[in-house]
Structure formats: structure tokens, C-alpha cells
Image (cartoon, rainbow, N blue to C red):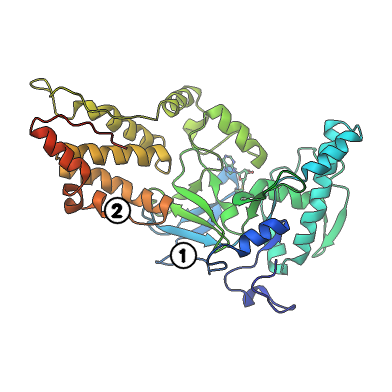
Amino acid sequence: MDYPPDAVDAKLVDIPGGWTECFITGHVKRLIYDTPGFARPPLSPPNGRSYRIGSACSKGLGMFATRVIRAGDLILDERPMMVCTVSSSKTFRVTLEVAKLSDEQRRQIVLHEWGKHIKLAFDRMPSENQKAFMEQFNSHEHDGSDEIAGYILFVHQHYLYSLIDITRRVGTNGLMCDLQDKGATGFKGRYTAICKDISRINHCCGPNATWKWHTDTFTVRITATRDIGIGEEITIAYCGPLLSAAERAMCLAPYGILHCKCSPSCSDEARSKIADERRARFPILLIPPADPPKSGEPEDAWVQPAVQRLQELEEEGLEGTFYFTQTSFQLINVYSFLHDVNKALWYANKLKGVWKALEGKDLDAAYSSEEGIKGSYFYSAGETRKKGMPVKVSFI
Ligand SMILES: C[S@@+](CC[C@H](N)C(=O)[O-])C[C@H]1O[C@@H](n2cnc3c(N)ncnc32)[C@H](O)[C@@H]1O
């Protein structure tokens, strides 16, 4: 992809938004060009750079906050060095099946062919990006998976590399892009992005930041999902954080993470069991009781399961998930219904940063201001109820 068209002798410095080399199909190329606003410049964090790359001990390098970062703050919007497929052609695999090769032989040949294509993209990179790409972490260095794919050798900047040196860096560092081929035949790939700085962010099962692919800016965007202190490591989830520990382990293996070291409790069996049980019961739906509270019982006794659920989500570091926003919205709506505006605003305050991080916009005024809450459907439903009239409400 050469967009916008640049001079043949362009340097990295001539492309301030960042230079991405792509290995993509024609269909995906058209899809990118047709994206409204493509190629907007990447967003700049309003308060400037807020991170440094440094040692994260046994995890290698990592990203660390250099100032306090608030939930919802943009940390980095980075154009990748490379975007490429994560797998190779289905049609090609079928052809190999016909050739009666073993599964392992097929895997090696597909990997080799994929590597040859990725090297084409690598060769077109500006030399600064080639250097930065080769400096990225390679977690598969000694796993013995290079019999065929490692066959082609090339010299780059006085070092001898094999194709596998490139493909392994893609596997270790790639984050999934939201680009997808259509159609059932021919080349069908999911896409992955390798960035200079974002690829240094380590995985955490209870991360403090989230990542999202944006085709209009052609960037991976990192936003904080909770407040991050100075010096604290910035982390993202490489896989669905609501999965069980066993499922997460399966998803992390291709990144070369065989034992997740995100926190001491992650490897603690008893703690993992509790975390699994909590994750399995996170969805919750509040239904108001038909009868008024018994004397002496707080009016919001029936809300407590959701209050506890939100606390558990925070304890697990799962603020950046659907269940956190869903439970928060329910609590805002319920406390509007009960005419407890302060509590409604208290939950709105918890939600606002996460909402900004996930949705890229501020929370609607109906949820975040006294007037908004008092003008909401739930507040008036609560009024009707207070007048002794029956109401049927659903809080989501
Ligand atoms: C995308 S890179 C992250 C940056 C990397 N630490 C570096 O030095 O460049 C992924 C690699 O970081 C390490 N890593 C990331 N998160 C980890 C975690 N939670 N536990 C253990 N290792 C982790 C693993 O070696 C993995 O292969």
C-alpha cells in the first residue's frame, strides 16, 4: 500500500503519521480506501507523551507511566510498522492435503510460504523500521519450530537472519486488527499489527488499559481503563479477560507466554479458582421487587448483588469489560429509580473514564449530571412507583 503516494526515496521522517508496510489482499485494500476519513493522522494525547519503555523484569521490556494517567486518557495512537495476515491461504492448505502430506509438513510449508510474503513487506520497510522490527521480542527463539520455515537466510544490516526470525516476531508481537477478507474462497486472512512501542506492552489478566484498531487513522489506540500512577506498568489484555484461566492460557501460548506473570496471584491456584468462579457469574440483571421493602430493610437491599458484582469486577481489574459498563449502567438507572441522585452520580463517576476509553466519547448527560438523572425515564418511573402505582422497568 502506498497511500498517500510518497516519493520513491521517501524517508521515515517524511511521513510524520508513521509508515506501515502491509501484506493484505486487494479486497482489504479497497476496504481500507473506502473507510470514511482514511488516512486521518493519528490522535495526539492531549497532555503529551506519558510513558517510557523500560525493564519489566522477567517479562522483558514493558511500558511504564511517566505521569499520572486518568481512566479514559489516550496513552498512544500508533501506526504499526507492519500489518499482515496471521495465517495463510485456505486454498493452499487444501492443495497440500491432496498432496498427502502430514499435518506437521503442511504446517511447515504454509509457514514458509507465509514467511516469504511477509519478507516482501519487510524488505520495503524504511531501514529505521526494519531495525526496530528486528529488535522486537522473539519468544519462540528456542522452541525448535524452524525446520523448513527457517531455511531461507538473508543478511540485513550485517546480521544473518532467517525467515523465521521475521515470522516469529509477528507471532510474538502482533495485535489483531479489525480488518477482514470477505468471501469463502481464495485468500482468507485475519490481520495483525506489529508496532514499535505498543508491541512492548505486556499482557495482564486485569489490565489497566485497552487497545483498539482504527482503520481511519490506521492505528492501534491505547487508552487507560483506570487511573495509572507514576511508574506503574501499563498493561493490556492480549486475550478476552473474561475467559477462564485455562482458556486464557491457551490464547496466550502463541504469544510465547506459557506462564502468565502479570501478578503473583495469577499463578496461585486457589486465587485463580476464585477468579474463574467470579468470571463465570458476572452477568447480572436487576429486577425490582413487586412489594415495598419490609420495615427496617433498606430500600436498595435488592440492588446489593450488583453492587457486589461491580466490586468484584474492580478487584479482578476488569473495568474495561462489557460487564463493568453494563453493571454500572444498571446501578445508575436503579439509583435514579430510587431517587438517590448522589449514588447514581457516584456510579456515573466510576463509569465515565471507562466509557471514554471504550467508546471514545463522554458519558451522555442523562447519566452524568443531576439534571440529566432527574429528567431520565428511570427517575420518572420511580416517581410513579412512589405514588403507589405499579411500574414495570428493565434497567438495561
Ligand atoms: C508483545 S511482547 C511484549 C513486550 C516484551 N516484554 C518485550 O520485551 O519486548 C510479548 C512477550 O512479552 C512477554 N510477556 C508479556 N506479557 C507477559 C506476561 N503476562 N507474563 C509473562 N510474560 C509476558 C512474553 O515473553 C511475550 O512473549
Q: Is residue 250 above or below residue 379?
A: above
Q: Residue at x 30, y 31 (%)?
A: 306
In-image side of 245 versus 69 (left or right): right
In the depicted view, which residue is nearer to us: 314 or 242?
A: 242
User: Would you name the residue on which mark 2 appears?
Assistant: 364
In the depicted view, which residue is nearer to us: 324 or 39?
A: 39
Q: Is residue 72 above or below residue 383?
A: below
Regarding residue 82, the answer to whether it shows in the image is no
User: Would you name the residue on which mark 1 appears?
Assistant: 49
Q: Quadrant of residue 271?
A: top left
Q: In the rendered structure, which amino acid carries the disc numbered 1?
A: Arg
Q: Is mark 1 within 8 Å of ligand 1?
A: no
x and y, in percent, of residue 115 in the image: 80, 51
Q: Residue at x 52, y 32 (%)?
A: 243
Number of numbered discs = 2
Q: Secondary structure at mark 2?
A: loop
Marks 1 and 2, how far apart at CA: 28 Å
Q: Is residue 383 above or below residue 211?
A: above
